[in-house]
């Protein structure tokens, strides 16, 4: 600490020798050479982007060794690459400048579909792990809720890599923070046990009614186990009584003018509905067949079976072969992520149609009837 607080004498001459020469060299590089090199690289980036098609697809940024630095998607590849170049020229973010010093090649693949571009982008990110892609790179951001294997279970938040050790599972949630908020709401509604150890005769949490105190007696333990089952049912499917509780608490907090707390309950109501919708969609996506029809400028028909893309527009296309080359996951991680991509796309599009088909009917042959829009796809 004392060395770090050495005073600086302004009248003292700067050091001479190697230190002075080094400072001068790096100063010249910082002011001139990097800026000139970046400008030349941006010009080369724009020249390559001008040759990109104005069509939906994915694009890849590569370095001189051919390694993929970034994977993106757009409904207009040329326009999106020009936006990248404009932001780089304007100097938006040091991260972009580090990219432009390494990018030497741009490539793209037209998909003829917005949904397929989303699916292919996610698949390529998982296969190549580009350094420029922060999100979608790994699956471990998901979190689940489950009950502990105790005589008097507690509600736990677990990470994705631990979910094989627990059953049943409720989720997935986008991250641990969303899962913790939902766990706190359920613990308050059903007064679930949160203490780390059971104490005979109860504890202070039971006295202040933050817990149903199942450790007081055998009858209290039996009632608590029924309460745990009700909490699990609320997480397994849409529970109108749980919704009524959230709405009542929101109204109560609003009347007390605790608007921040009321807004939290309103947000949790939206998250609860989305969680149940996404969970049911994922469960059906893993076990049955799904037909998705993309309307609008790029009409497409996708046929999935147990989470795998089987056909598009009635058969395989060259871009589908590229999708297959990137590798189907051996476990269900890719299926979970793929279901999330499709679920979000259906929620954001008014011209998309989807319908689930029972697995037994799929094995006999795909139905030719036009499916209607799935009610689950409308949930936000």
Image (cartoon, helix red, strand yellow):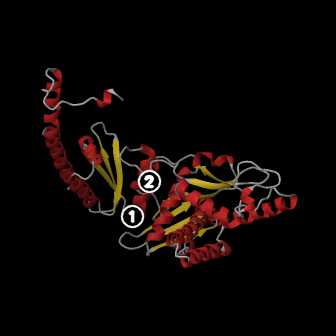
Q: Percent x, y for residue 180?
A: 58, 57
- Does residue 306 show up? no
Tell me the CA gap for discs 1 and 2: 13 Å
Single out the residue that lies furthest toward the right.
218
Residue at 34% over, 40% down: 67
Foreground residue among 121 and 313: 121
Give the vertical position of 212 relative to 352 (above or below): above
Residue at 73% over, 56% down: 204
Q: Secondary structure at mark 1?
A: helix
Q: Which mark is residue 114?
A: 1
- Does residue 330 show up? yes
Q: Which mark is residue 36?
A: none
Q: Circle 2 sits on which residue?
A: 122
Single out the residue that lies furthest toward the top.
17
CB of mark 1 within 8 Å of CB of mark 2? no
Left or right position of 246 against 34:
right
């Amino acid at each position: 600490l004392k060395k770090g607080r050495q005073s600086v004498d302004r009248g003292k001459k700067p050091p001479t020798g190697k230190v002075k020469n080094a400072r001068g060299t790096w100063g010249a590089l910082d002011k001139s050479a990097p800026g000139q090199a970046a400008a030349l690289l941006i010009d080369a980036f724009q020249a390559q982007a001008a040759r990109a098609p104005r069509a939906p697809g994915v694009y890849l940024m590569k370095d001189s060794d051919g390694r993929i630095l970034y994977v993106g998607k757009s409904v207009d590849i040329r326009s999106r690459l020009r936006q990248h170049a404009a932001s780089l020229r304007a100097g938006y973010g040091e991260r972009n400048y580090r990219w432009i010093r390494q990018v030497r090649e741009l490539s793209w693949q037209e998909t003829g579909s917005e949904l397929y571009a989303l699916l292919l982008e996610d698949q390529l990110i998982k296969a190549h792990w580009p350094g420029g892609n922060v999100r979608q790179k790994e699956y471990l951001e998901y979190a689940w809720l489950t009950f502990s294997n105790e005589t008097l279970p507690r509600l736990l938040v677990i990470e994705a890599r631990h979910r094989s050790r627990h059953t049943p599972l409720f989720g997935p949630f986008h991250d641990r923070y969303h899962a913790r908020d939902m766990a706190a709401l359920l613990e308050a509604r059903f007064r679930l046990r949160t203490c780390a150890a059971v104490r005979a005769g109860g504890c202070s949490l039971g006295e202040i009614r933050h817990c149903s105190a199942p450790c007081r007696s055998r009858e209290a333990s039996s009632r608590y186990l029924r309460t745990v089952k009700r909490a699990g049912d609320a997480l397994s499917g849409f529970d109108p009584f749980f919704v009524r509780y959230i709405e009542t608490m929101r109204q109560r907090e609003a009347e007390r003018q605790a608007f921040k707390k009321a807004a939290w309950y309103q947000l949790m109501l939206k998250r609860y509905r989305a969680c149940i919708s996404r969970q049911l969609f994922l469960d059906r996506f893993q076990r049955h067949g799904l037909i998705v029809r993309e309307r609008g400028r790029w009409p497409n028909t996708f046929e999935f079976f147990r989470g795998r893309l089987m056909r598009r527009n009635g058969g395989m296309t060259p871009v589908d072969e590229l999708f297959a080359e990137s590798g189907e996951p051996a476990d269900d991680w890719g299926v979970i992520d793929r279901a999330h991509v499709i679920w979000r796309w259906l929620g954001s599009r008014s011209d998309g149609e989807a319908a689930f088909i029972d697995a037994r009917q799929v094995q006999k042959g795909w139905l030719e009837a036009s499916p209607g829009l799935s009610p689950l796809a409308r949930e936000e």
